[in-house]
Image: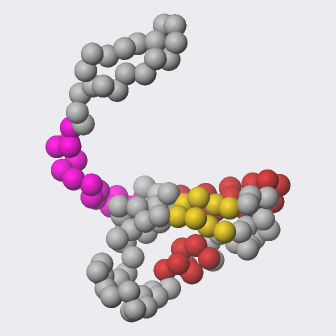
């Protein structure tokens, strides 16, 4: 029922209300110019600074890498067809590189905005 015993003083709910999916009318969001054009650059800069000292063994990517437009290919293409669009190079390989990053494995999944 969604209740978790967090110890003394924890709050319990008799009912957890279902999510209201009518507020946004679905998963797609409108693009708003000026909202986060520099967000990925800021994240990349922070990763570069941190990777120099922390020396990560791998990176986890939780998806939504191609948020506004998705991957430039079609879902359901046959597996033998190669769909190289150059997006990975521009959005990842060139963006996330440097000391402590180069040669480190990236593990990821496609998010709901990637396909």
Residue occupying the far right of the picture: 53
Horizontal placement of 10 versus 24: left or right? right
Image quadrant where one finds the C terminus: bottom left
Chief secondary structure of the magenta span? loop
Residue 98 shows in this picture: yes
Residue 27 shown in magenta: yes
Q: Is residue 105 above or below residue 78?
A: above
In the displayed structure, does residue 73 sit left or right of residue 61? left
Residue 56 in percent (x, y) is at 74, 58
Of residues 110 and 78, the one nearer the viewer is 78
At x 21%, y 53%, the residue is 26
Q: Residue at position x 33%, y 88% from top?
A: 78
Asked where in the image residue 96 lies, by quadrant, the reply is: bottom right
Residue 53's place in the image compared with 78, above or below, is: above
* Whole-percent x, y for residue 107 in the image: 58, 65
Closest to the observer: 66 or 82?
Answer: 82
Where is 30 relative to 95, above or below?
above
Q: How is the image coloured?
A: secondary structure
- Could you tell me how many numbered marks the image carries? 0
Residue 40 seen from this side: no
23, 74: nearer the viewer: 74
Image: magenta residue range: 20-34
Instruction: State the image coordinates of residue 89 (x, y, percent, origin top left).
Output: 57, 81
Image coordinates of residue 62 in percent, x first then y, are 50, 57
Residue visible at 29% across and 80% down in the picture: 76
Q: From what the image shows, is residue 107 above or below residue 76?
A: above
- Residue at image coords 50%, 85%: 86
- In the rendered structure, does residue 93 fall within the stretch colored magenta? no
Q: Residue furthest top?
A: 9
């Amino acid at each position: 029922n969604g209740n978790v015993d967090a110890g003394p003083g924890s709050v319990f709910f008799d009912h957890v209300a279902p999510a209201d999916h009518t507020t946004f009318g679905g998963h797609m969001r409108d693009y708003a110019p000026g909202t986060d054009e520099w967000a990925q650059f800021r994240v990349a800069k922070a990763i570069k600074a941190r990777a120099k000292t922390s020396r990560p063994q791998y990176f986890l990517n939780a998806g939504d890498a191609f948020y506004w437009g998705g991957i430039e290919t079609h879902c359901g293409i046959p597996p033998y067809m190669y769909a190289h669009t150059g997006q990975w190079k521009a959005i990842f390989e060139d963006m996330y590189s440097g000391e402590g990053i180069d040669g480190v494995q990236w593990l990821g999944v496609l998010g709901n905005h990637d396909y």
